[in-house]
Image (spheres, grey):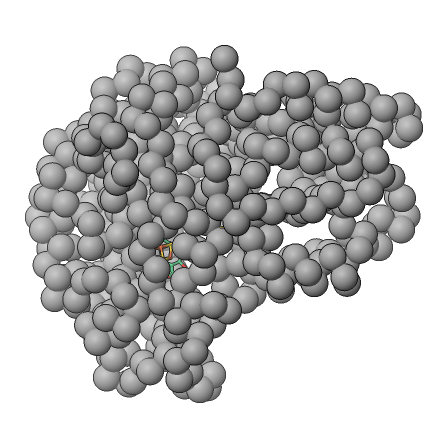
Amino acid sequence: MPEYDVLEIEKLKRETGRYAEKLGRKPTACVVTFGCQMNARDSEKLLGILLTAGFEESADEKADLVVINTCTVRENANERLYGHLGHLNSMKREHPLKLIALCGCMMQEKDEVERIRKTYSFVDVVFGVHNLYRFPALLARRMESGRKVFEVWDKAEKIVEDLPVKRDVPYKSGVNISYGCDNFCTYCIVPYVRGRERSRRPEDILCEIRRLAEDGVIEIMLLGQNVNSYGKGLEEKVTFAELLEEVCRIPGIERVRFMTSHPKDLSPELIRVIRDNEKVCRHLHLPLQSGSSRILTQMNRHYTKESYLDLTRRIKEAVPGISLTTDIIVGFPGETEEDFEETLDVVRQVRFDSAFTFIYSPRTGTPAAKMEQVPPEVIKERFARLLDLVQKIGAEESGRDVGKTLPALVEGSDPQVPGRVTGRLSNNVMVHFPGDESLIGKIVNVQLKEVHGFYYIGEMS
Ligand code: SAH
Ligand code: SF4
Ligand code: F3S
């Protein structure tokens, strides 16, 4: 028996039916996602609810209902939302029956919700990350009453299982293993908006993955803000490494990825499980944030430059050929030229395959926002230097598998070249090779012939 309220979906179905009568056709819905994989997974649930209730999926914001799943990790994420809202407002003037709903991390911020209430009065429904499963009830109430519905909760009441889901692609899926974050890195807003860390029960996770496998999914991405601390607070003592091993045992699942790993909690046991399980993909995203031990302390990251270097060395030794990627923040308050040089030094030593580089963005309510800020022109100059180095090393590292034959999961047709498909290698690098659409969703062996920039050109063997 699903835990979410079936009656609420039935009610939404009835309201959607009335809405369809007014429109004279089946209503369309477009879900727009900002932010991380967690949000992407939540959006699949939102779309699942809407399709069950009688909406038709649309990729176009001209749709009758537009839901924006927001992110607030950096200021530019917030600016993007306001940009979209301006646009949606003019569309709504042309289509007065249009409905606009906002949800996600930014809606957990009271000031932003107030701003929307006052300045963006055309927004119909607002809800947050803790009451996502209430979406059918809230949307139905809006449709029935014609009045705006705002409902945001400060914290999670319970983990609701078994919401309907419309997966983005048929052959792979994200699966949440934990929600929220307890780490309180001093720059980060996620713990404030996503709440305390809560692990899903292992049996619920495994049951979901078994069902996905029966439904044709072959690749799983386990999702959590810090997957390595999975299990905290559960009655049954279980570590992330144990969970990962169990997931690999599920018949039909060929590949397992996970995101994100916090260096402070990455155990030797996990390194062994990666090493011993072919199904675990040869790619680890391990956010560094800064290479300066002094800044790492200020960031509350609980590791040092030396321990990070030692960890990456042990991983590379245990799993040769593994691809390491990272996140780096430039211009954290108080960052000096020497601190920044330490970051460059780690990049040179680890030789990441790629790195997401971010300019530090002060977030209201976080400790770092109150610290002394680095001048923007200094940050800009450092950012350019870091980007140069990251790209140079990435380019040097790319192509190290030329000549090898490796399995690739075919993800689609190559949009550039007809008669060619695009596959993803276990280490997350893409390869293009001759093939047709019937290969999509299958794992095939590809000989890597040459490298173009960051991807390979190959041939099926
Ligand atoms: N839980 C994950 C990722 C969270 S957000 C982790 O700990 O790695 C993704 C990335 O955004 C972070 O790794 C960090 O590099 C970046 N980020 C978070 N807050 C930021 C801020 N205030 N300014 C700039 N970058 C930030
Ligand atoms: Fe933010 Fe740190 Fe938690 Fe990642 S681990 S979500 S950076 S507080
Ligand atoms: Fe953004 Fe929320 Fe993810 S703030 S990065 S969508 S957890």
Q: State whether residue 271 is above or below residue 370.
A: above
Residue located at (50% from left, 64% from top): 74
In which of the image's four quarters is ligand 1 placed?
bottom left
Residue 164 in view, yes or no: yes
Q: State whether residue 194 is above or below residue 332.
A: above
Q: State whether residue 177 is above or below residue 61.
A: above
Give left or right: position of 10 versus 121. left
Residue nearest the viewer, comparing 325 with 11: 11
Q: Provide residue 246's location: percent of width, then percent of height.
A: 23, 24
Residue nearest the viewer, comparing 144 with 302: 144
Q: Provide residue 95's location: percent of width, then percent of height.
A: 88, 43
Residue 388 in view, yes or no: no
Q: Provide residue 340's location: percent of width, then percent of height.
A: 28, 78
Q: Provide residue 350's location: percent of width, then percent of height.
A: 19, 61
Give left or right: position of 292 versus 132. left
Residue located at (78% from left, 20% from top): 14
Q: State whether residue 138 is above or below residue 166.
A: below
Can you tell which quarter of the image residue 223 is in? top left
